[in-house]
Amino acid sequence: MVEVRYFAGAADASGCAAETFDLPGGSDLAALKAAVAHRHGGKVADVLRVSAFLIGDDLTRDPTATFGDRVDILPPFAGG
C-alpha cells in the first residue's frame, strides 16, 4: 500500500489531496503513474508527464525508481 499525496495542479487534476493505491512491493514510478492515470484519467496523466516525485528525501523523474509507503507528486510550480 502506498500513500500518494498530490500538490498544486496535481491536486486540482485528481480532485483530492491524498489517497492510497494497493501496488505490489517493488513497484516503480511507471506503475504508480499508470495506476494514478487509470483512476483519474487524462487530465492527471498530463500533469504526471511534467511532475517530479518526492520519495523520502529524493526528488526524481526516473520511471524506474522504486518507492516505499509514500510518494508526493509535485507538478511544476508558478508555471515552471
Image (spheres, rainbow, N blue to C red):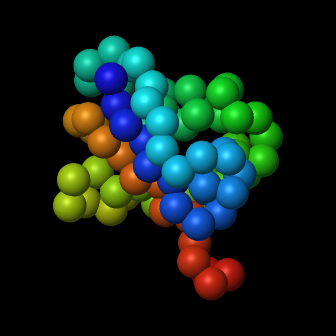
In which quarter of the view is residue 50 placed? Answer: bottom right
Q: How many marks?
A: 0
In which quarter of the view is residue 64 placed? Answer: top left
Residue 63 visible in the displayed image: no
Relative horizontal placement of residue 16, taking residue 41 as reference (left or right): left
Rendered view: 64 above or below 57: above
Rendered view: 77 above or below 33: below
Residue for point 61% across, 56% down: 10
The quarter of the rendered structure image containing the C terminus is bottom right
Image x and y of residue 3, in percent: 37, 37
Image x and y of residue 68, in percent: 23, 35
Relative horizontal placement of residue 27, taking residue 36 as reference (left or right): left
Residue for point 61% across, 55% down: 11
Residue for point 71% across, 51% down: 13
Residue for point 69% across, 57% down: 12
Which is more toward the observer, 57 or 3? 3
The quarter of the rendered structure image containing the N terminus is top left
